[in-house]
Structures are given as structure tokens and as C-alpha cells.
Amino acid sequence: MSRPMTDPVAGPLADSITMIGRSVRLARRNTDTLVMSVVLPLLMMTLFVHVFGGAIDTGTRYVDYVVPGIVLLCVGYGAASTAMSVADDLTKGMVDRLRSMPIRPFVVLTGHVVASVARNAVSTTVVIGAAVAMGFRPTASPVEWAATAGLLLLYVLGLSWLAAGLGVVAKSVEAAGTFSFLMLFLPYLSSAFVPTGTMPAVLRVISEHQPITPIIETVRGLLTGTPVGGAGWAALAWSVGLLAVSFTLATLLYRRRTRD
């Protein structure tokens, strides 16, 4: 699976490709996670667009308002499942079999993170296609679509590495699964479904100073032409910061766990 680390680039790269291939194959077999990462956002979107949408005033067509929030919910839930994949490897002894091999700590986790990105790309594409069928009409140019994809990629990478770190410290797969619940709940405390100005003062402060709100506002602005303002830079800063901190934390926790 691995080779002696004589080459500081070729060795880790080959090991990463091997672990990525393994994780992608496992993700393809784990149809429950893939189906849930698509079906749940679709159900939420249908509920908000067709049941609640007529009663919520956002100053614009509600389907155009809510879809960016549903996309963030989709990728958040999909990335959070990385914690369960990592915890499953640790509890079933897969990592123990790799201890004797000269594999750098980040390589094993990289496989799970890249599989998360691939899984999220599929689910996000399906959700956006369903949103268009429900009446979503994005006005984004190719450049704006590319910027949206780039921002979502950064966010998914940061969140997947965070989930990987939580999977390392989780005592069981079930415990790791609680992160998925958190990622389902957190979008409600943002501008995903209603403008933050309609919230009570305390909740408004929370929703306006957490990472999901500026990312949603940026995605919404890029896709539908609403003003982005300073949300774009805030979204970029949150995403890059989350990625840097999560990658460092996950690799340190993995190294400590595998030394025990």
C-alpha cells in the first residue's frame, strides 16, 4: 500500500491516491449516506418552498431565497458524515493495520476528505437540478458559477477536515454521528430560511456572527444577483480559516490517537 518515504513528494502522493481510491469505493457502497445526503435536503426544500414559502416574506421569490441555504445544508450534512467514516476505520482496526507502514498521518484522513468532496459534488448537483425543477432561476454567469463552486469547495474541505478530527476523538461511530445533527441544526440559526433582521435580538447576533450566514449570503448573491457586500470577504476568511485550523487539528489528533 505504501512505499518507503525516500521521496518527500512521490511517496505521500502515491499513498494519498491509494487511500482516496479506497474511500471513494467505500462511499459508493455506502448508499444509505449518499441517499440521505440527497433526499433530506430535497424534502427540506419541498417543505419550505411549497408549505412555508407562501407565508414567509423575504422581499423576493422565496424559492430563489431558500435554495442557497438548502445547498449549504446539503453540503454540511454530507461533510459531517466524514466523522462516522473515520470513526468506523478506527473502531474496526483498519488504522491499526496501517501503523507499521511509513504513512504520514494526513494521508489516511485525506482519503475520507476527498471522498466527502466527491459525494457532496454529486448531491449538490442533484439538489440544484431539483431546485430548478421547482422554479429556482439563477442568474449567475459562468464566472459566478465558478466562484460559487470554489467557495463551496473551500467550505466542504474545511468542514470535512473538522469532521475527520471529530471522528478521530469519537469513541464510537454513533457518537461521531452527532456532528451530522449539529450541521442540520446550525443552518436554522443563519439567514438560510429567513432574513436575520426578523429574528429576536439575541438570535440575530448569533446568526450574523457565525460562518454559515456570510457563506449563504455570498452564494445567494452570486447565484441570484443580490448584493454580496462584505459577506464575500467574510465567507472567504471563514472558509480558509476553517480549513487551516481543521486540517492542523485533525492531523494532530490522528497522530496522537495512533501513538497510543
Image: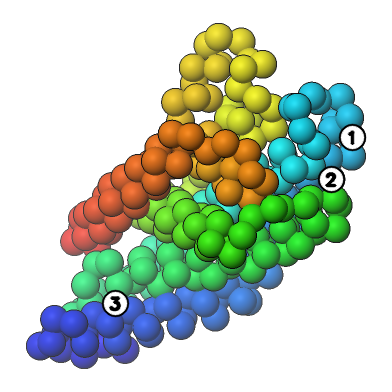
User: What residue sits right under mark 1 in the picture?
Assistant: 51
Residue in the foreground of this view, choosing between 31 and 55:
55
Of circles 1 and 3, the one toward us is 1
Question: What is the quadrant of residue 44 in the picture?
Answer: top right
Above or below 108: residue 37: above
Q: Position of residue 19 (x, y in %)?
A: 39, 79
Ranked by sequence position, the earlier of labels 1 and 2 is 2
Above or below 209: residue 119: below
- 254 displayed left or right of 141: left
Above or below 78: residue 117: below
User: What residue sits right under mark 2 in the picture?
Assistant: 46
Amino acid type indicated by mark 2? Thr
SS for callout 3: helix
Number of numbered discs visible in the structure rendering: 3
Residue in the foreground of this view, choosing between 207 and 178:
207
Most extreme residue toward the top, as rendered?
201
SS for callout 1: helix
Q: Position of residue 142 (x, y in %)?
A: 59, 64
What mark, if any, has residue 99 been given in the picture? none
Of circles 3 and 2, the one toward us is 2
Gap in angstroms between the C-alphas marked 1 and 3: 50 Å
- 247 displayed left or right of 94: left
Figure coloring: rainbow
Ranked by sequence position, the earlier of labels 1 and 3 is 1
Crowd class of label 3 (few under 14; some 14 to 19; many from 20; radius 10 Å): some
Quadrant location, the C terminus: bottom left
User: What residue sits right under mark 3 in the picture?
Assistant: 98
SS for callout 2: helix
Q: Position of residue 229 (x, y in %)?
A: 48, 34
